[in-house]
Amino acid sequence: MPLIDPILAELEQESISTRKLVQIVPEDKLGWRPHPKSMSLGQLAFHIAVLPEGIAEAASLDQFELPEFNHPHPKNKKEILDSLEKSLARAKQKLSTFDDVRLKETWTANSNGKQMMAIPRIAMIRSILLNHWYHHRGQLNVYLRLLNVPLPPIYGPTADESPFAATKESEAATRPALR
């Protein structure tokens, strides 16, 4: 099996949960931010949407100069959703061109000409595309929870959807009394 196949399968599987979260982003809250240093909800959702394509494109280079990061504000939720679909399709297409030899080659990231990282390309994809994507998806979960948006399951039931989630009243009724 080519080394890229499990990466592509994971990207496809994780895109399901990512899509669910992005779909429930409240459009009227795109400018909301939990802290002045944080991205807005819209910026974070848009970053999550475009990240797969951007990182797949960076992975196709042997040396990548780290850009100055800016986080654009999407116009609306449709822009975020459309960008996610386009980004996923382009990332899968780009990643599927990598053979095992290419994946084992060293990928280098530079900042102002200074080497910041030199790792096998497959490690870059695992770390910067997938793990980085999950990190931001976790942030989005927190943003949505803070906005009282019911969360869908990702790796298991959430307190919003679990039939096993106990209410405070039922917990108190079943808890043994302390003496």
Image: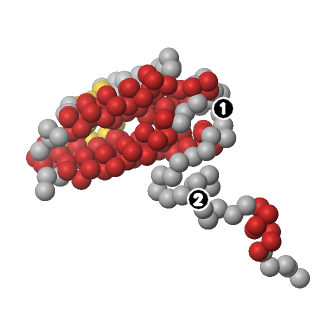
Q: Is residue 155 above or below residue 133?
A: below
Q: Which amino acid type corresponds to the residue marked 2 in the rendered image?
A: Ser
Residue 114 in view (yes/no): no
Quarter that holds the N terminus: bottom left
- Residue at x 24% of width, y 53% of height: 6
Q: State the residue position of label 2.
A: 162
| Marks 1/2: CA–CA distance | 29 Å
Q: Which mark is residue 26?
A: none
- Residue at x 43% of width, y 39% of height: 19
Query: Do the residues under discs 1 and 2 have CB atoms within 8 angstroms?
Result: no
In the image, farthest residue toward the front? 163
Q: Which mark is residue 35?
A: 1
Residue situated in front as seen by the camera: 58 or 143: 143
Q: Position of residue 106 (x, y in %)?
A: 20, 42
Nearest to N terminus: mark 1 or mark 2: 1
Of tags 1 and 2, the one toward the viewer is 2
Q: Secondary structure at mark 2?
A: loop
Q: Is residue 175 above or below residue 4?
A: below
Residue situated in front as seen by the camera: 24 or 43: 24
- Residue at x 20% of width, y 35% of height: 93
- Residue at x 31% of width, y 45% of height: 11
Q: Quadrant of residue 139?
A: top right
Q: Quadrant of residue 30?
A: top right
Left or right of 56 in this view: 142: right
Q: Position of residue 104 (x, y in %)?
A: 16, 48
Q: Position of residue 146 (x, y in %)?
A: 66, 40
For label 2, the crowd category at 10 Å Cα-Cα, with few meaning under 14, some 14 to 19 and many 20 or more, is: few
Q: Position of residue 43 (x, y in %)?
A: 51, 26
Q: Which amino acid type corresponds to the residue marked 1 in the rendered image?
A: His
In the image, farthest residue toward the right? 179
Left or right of 45 in this view: 105: left
Q: Secondary structure at mark 1?
A: loop
